[in-house]
Image (tube, helix red, strand yellow):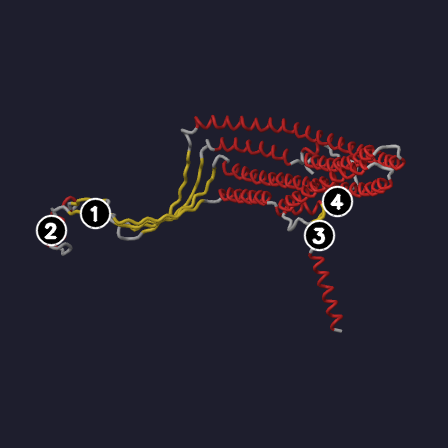
Amino acid sequence: MKRYIYIIAVTLALANCQSLFAQQTYTLEQILDSARHNNITLRNAQRSVDAAEQQRKEAFTKYFPTVSGSGFWFNANKGMAQMDINMSQFISPEIATGLVQSGVLPVEALASLGQPVSMELMKKGVMGSVMAMQPVFAGGQIINGNKLAKVGEDVSRLQLQLSENEIEKTAEQYYWQIVSLEEKLKTVNAVETLLSDINKDVTVAVKAGVAMRNDLLQVELRQNDVESQKLTLNNNISILRMVLAQYCGLQNTDFVLDYNPEVLSPMLEKQDHQQALLNTPEYKLLGKQVEATDLQHKLAIGSNLPTVAVGAGLVYHNLMESGRSFGMLMATVSIPISDWWGGSHAIKRKKIERQKAIDQLADNSELLKINMQSAWNNVQEAYQQLGIAERSIEQATENLRLNRDFYQAGTCTMSDLLEAQLLYQQALDKRTDSYTNYQNKLLAYRHAVGK
């Protein structure tokens, strides 16, 4: 019984090891999702969005009163206010005599009444205050400043979308490059098998004396060339796997790419370019640029208008050896008189920049539509080239079959047979290149129309 348990345990352990080292299979969507979550450029773009959001929240605080508190303590070497007081200027001798007789003033005070008395004030003290100021009118600077901060946040989100699109585009390009090389490697392996069969047939024919040794040497040279191609392909595939793994944050480079070899009609991807233009992040960014310059023009106007604010405060001081506190209400009006001259030119400059943004929107919109049409033409051309490549495979396959039969019948040379083999390999590689080129052209078109 223990022996059976041991066998089961070993079997389960081997199964776990096999699953552990099994190759991970990735679809295109999984590769793109991994790139979106792990690419450092995209993470930094997201941080820019977070920073723009904080800036918008910071601008919103300008609607609320500004509250400030201050404190001040001093101790001077002498009083800040000093004076000499002669009481005889305020009390006549008759009044002083009456005060002495009534016992209000001592006799000694009557004698010193004519002598000046030195006094000093505010030699040391404490002051403290709390003030709150609420802007009432600021020329629209607060409102427009908040709108501009919101535009900045929208721009950062659009730039994040552009970064995401570019990262997905790059990742997908790496994906199709690896697919292309792996398909060519499959072609090389098939050709290698084909040449191996030809080698066996020629070897038998040479030994039988019905074929020349030169034919066998030609086959072997072609096998060496195919082996060299195989080494190059394996090396390039290895490098591209490392690049894709680093770009998308994959754990290892031993993975399998799962793709659908079916070729769909490009008409399934066709978009209305005028409607698609409005949804592209590039067009939206141009619109945000116009909106931003319009708000900057309004801010320039507002900076040359008067600002009005009201406020309240609580003040405490201890300057006369006794503390005292009091409240106050206040209002301020600020008029930038000396700034009007330069400000008028700043307003005109912002107006010019706004018009430039409008012209740029109109011009670049046309360029974006041209790019869409160019990308669509490339898709159609790539689709037609793919059809030609598929027909070429049929022709090259039949040509290879005929030349192999002809060689076996002795009606063609080995050079003719190897030339047919080379044309067959080139046709397969051309189909692979046309297929991946079609996928890349579709990718470029999707990005051009904002999909």
- Secondary element type, mark 4: loop
Q: Amino acid at mark 3?
A: Gln
Q: Identify which residue is drawn at 72% across, 65% down.
A: 10
Q: Amino acid at mark 4?
A: Tyr
Q: Quadrant of the N terminus?
A: bottom right
- Mark found first going from the N terminus, 4 or 2: 2
> Mark 3 highlights which residue?
23
- Mark found first going from the N terminus, 1 or 3: 3
Between the residue at mark 1 and the residue at mark 2, the CA separation in whole angstroms equals: 23 Å
Q: Quadrant of residue 204?
A: top right
Disc nearest the viewer among 4 and 2: 4
Q: Nearer the viewer, residue 7 or 101?
A: 7
Q: Amino acid at mark 1?
A: Glu
- Mark found first going from the N terminus, 1 or 2: 2
Q: Is residue 26 left or right of residue 424?
A: left
Between the residue at mark 3 and the residue at mark 2, the CA separation in whole angstroms equals: 115 Å
Q: Residues within 10 Å of mark 4 (few under 14, many from 20)?
A: few
Q: Residues within 10 Å of mark 1 (few under 14, many from 20)?
A: few
Q: Is residue 443 left or right of residue 333?
A: right
